[in-house]
Image (cartoon, helix red, strand yellow):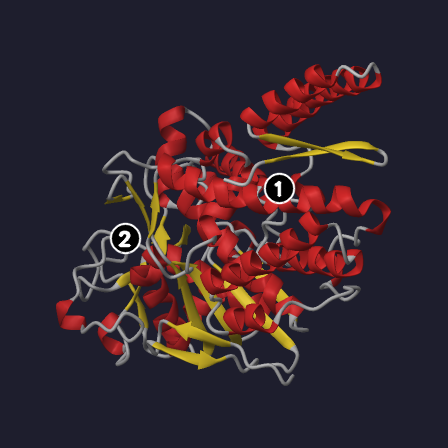
């Protein structure tokens, strides 16, 4: 590969060249959901960001293995399932399906593998055994059956988040009982009275279940090997989750991830989205109010590392920008008719494409997935295409521009022409109704012109224009588009 792709590495706090462990192939592990409840906008942002990265790597010629786990056993799953009187595994599966549906609604490509924590208990036990044998972990001092990672035993503990051990708060994932140090974190949690027996597995230290952090260390290396290219997730996972993953994996002798990538947090009403503030925005609420395409455009239009501010006003601004793109593509495809280009196809890594993306777009995404700069190139290309469309000249160039715009937007996951968005969401219903209304008025206008009643024909055209709808006569009848905002 001659292409240089640079990504910001949270671990080194610098932008580094991507140098795949295996030439021509990139392995990515993304922390998926703990399926305790409904997916919220933060989950959707992380999934969409790493989907963009995957699409760009595929366009650049890499084969990509993306692993996104499902944490289906956890303290919160047990407590929330008990609150509603549902078996913990049924509770987990209910919300796993909700996450799958939300990802699909946003046209996030399915992961190469989607391992569940409960399917990899053996690998976790083996990893814990390695840590105990190496002197970095120990069974609880009170013989409870818990197992802890000895944070002070690993000299580089805190390296990912640039913290000193002495400055860290106690680990709150288990009781202090049986710990050598309050900052030691749980690798294995013994089964407790009152917990369902189905939520425990046999282990050398007694029946129990894995701690949260050991799950991802075991699953990532099973599918990607002891050294892989990229570990991703939301910024809120840096500590303690990713810090602990890194420590226990390196302590066990695995090189683990070369680059750590983190998508930024979300603010709602000026405050960080959190359960304690009660300002979480859930996927179901978003899709009731906005089309999935508009949601995805909002989530991925900014720099992936930036704080994203959610508000109805911000959604409206982004929706207006998206409408401008959709309007151009609709008009251009109507004008080109049979000469319109084929849609880009990510399923074959865009191998059959008729055009390449502009150099400026490529340079932007090669530089730490610089989406705002890439979108600027999209809009510049749309402006060029709109001039050709208005002039009615050079159909070949217009067709090339449409292909370029759709390819760029498809890589960003927001191509309005893509089949994934056809007939989905509230926008599709609105568009269908608008098509019917305009078609009826266009028929009245055509009849008026046939009877030489030009005053009526002009009045219909002007009424449509006052509503923001431009109707144009063509050799085949008519076409319409919405005025650019």
- Farthest residue to the bottom: give it: 2
Name the spot of residue 371 as percent of width and height, x first.
48, 61
Q: Nearer the viewer, mark 2 or mark 1?
A: 1
Left or right, residue 261 beside residue 435 = left
Name the spot of residue 391 as percent of width and height, x first.
70, 51
Q: Which mark is residue 172?
A: none
Q: Which residue is located at x 69 percent, y 42 percent? A: 331
Name the spot of residue 298 as percent of width and height, x first.
46, 46
Q: Which mark is residue 327?
A: 1
Between 309 and 401, the residue placed more toward the observer is 401
Question: Is residue 121 visible from the viewing direction of this image?
Answer: yes
Left or right, residue 379 beside residue 149 = right
Image quarter hosting the N terminus? bottom right
Name the spot of residue 416 as percent of width and height, x first.
63, 44
Between 411 and 1, the residue placed more toward the observer is 411
Residue 214 occupies quadrant = bottom left
* Residue that label 2 marks: 173
Helix or strand or loop: what does disc 1 sit on? helix
Between 167 and 355, the residue placed more toward the observer is 355
Helix or strand or loop: what does disc 2 sit on? loop
Q: Which residue is located at x 68 percent, y 19 percent? A: 437
Residue 195 occupies quadrant = top left
Q: Earlier in the sequence, mark 2 or mark 1?
A: 2
Q: Which residue is located at x 18 percent, y 59 percent? A: 170
Question: Is residue 211 visible from the viewing direction of this image?
Answer: no
């Amino acid at each position: 590969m001659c292409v240089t792709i640079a990504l910001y590495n949270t671990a080194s706090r610098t932008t580094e060249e991507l140098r795949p462990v295996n030439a021509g192939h990139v392995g990515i592990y993304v922390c998926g959901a703990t399926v305790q409840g409904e997916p919220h906008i933060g989950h959707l942002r992380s999934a969409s960001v790493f989907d963009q990265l995957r699409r760009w790597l595929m366009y650049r010629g890499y084969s990509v293995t993306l692993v996104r786990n499902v944490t289906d056993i956890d303290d919160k799953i047990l407590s929330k399932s008990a609150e509603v009187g549902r078996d913990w595994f049924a509770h987990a599966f209910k919300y796993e399906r909700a996450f799958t549906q939300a990802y699909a609604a946003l046209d996030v490509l399915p992961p190469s593998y989607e391992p569940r924590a409960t399917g990899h208990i053996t690998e976790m036990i083996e990893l814990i055994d390695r840590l105990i044998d190496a002197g970095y972990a120990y069974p609880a001092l009170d013989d409870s059956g818990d197992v802890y990672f000895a944070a002070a035993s690993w000299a580089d503990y805190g390296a990912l988040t640039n913290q000193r051990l002495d400055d860290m708060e106690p680990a709150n994932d288990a009781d202090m009982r049986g710990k050598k140090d309050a900052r030691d974190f749980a690798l294995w949690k013994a089964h407790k009275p009152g917990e369902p027996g189905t939520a425990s597995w046999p282990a050398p230290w007694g029946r129990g279940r894995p701690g949260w952090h050991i799950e991802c260390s075991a699953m990532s290396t099973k599918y990607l090997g002891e050294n892989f290219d990229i570990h991703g997730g939301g910024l809120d996972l840096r500590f303690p989750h990713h810090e602990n993953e890194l420590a226990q994996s390196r302590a066990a002798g695995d090189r683990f991830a070369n680059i750590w990538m983190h998508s930024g947090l979300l603010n709602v009403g000026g405050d960080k989205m959190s359960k304690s503030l009660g300002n979480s925005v859930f996927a179901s609420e978003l899709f009731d109010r906005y089309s999935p395409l508009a949601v995805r455009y909002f989530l991925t239009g900014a720099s992936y590392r930036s704080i994203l501010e959610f508000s109805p006003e911000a959604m409206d601004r982004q929706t207006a920008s998206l409408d401008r793109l959709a309007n151009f593509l609709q008009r251009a495809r109507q004008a080109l008719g049979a000469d319109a280009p084929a849609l880009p196809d990510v399923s074959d890594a865009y191998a059959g494409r008729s055009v390449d993306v502009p150099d400026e777009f490529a340079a932007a995404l090669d530089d730490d997935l610089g989406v705002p700069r890439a979108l600027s190139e999209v809009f510049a290309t749309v402006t060029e295409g709109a001039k050709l469309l208005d002039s009615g000249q050079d159909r070949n160039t217009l067709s090339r521009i449409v292909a370029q715009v759709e390819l760029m937007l498809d890589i960003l996951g927001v191509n309005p022409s893509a089949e994934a968005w056809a007939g989905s969401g509230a926008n599709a219903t609105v568009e269908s109704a608008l098509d019917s209304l305009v078609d009826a008025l266009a028929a009245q206008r055509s009849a008026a012109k046939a009877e030489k009643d030009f005053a009526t024909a002009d009045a219909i055209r002007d009424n449509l224009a006052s509503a923001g709808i431009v109707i144009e006569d063509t050799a085949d009848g008519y076409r319409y588009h919405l005025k650019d905002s």
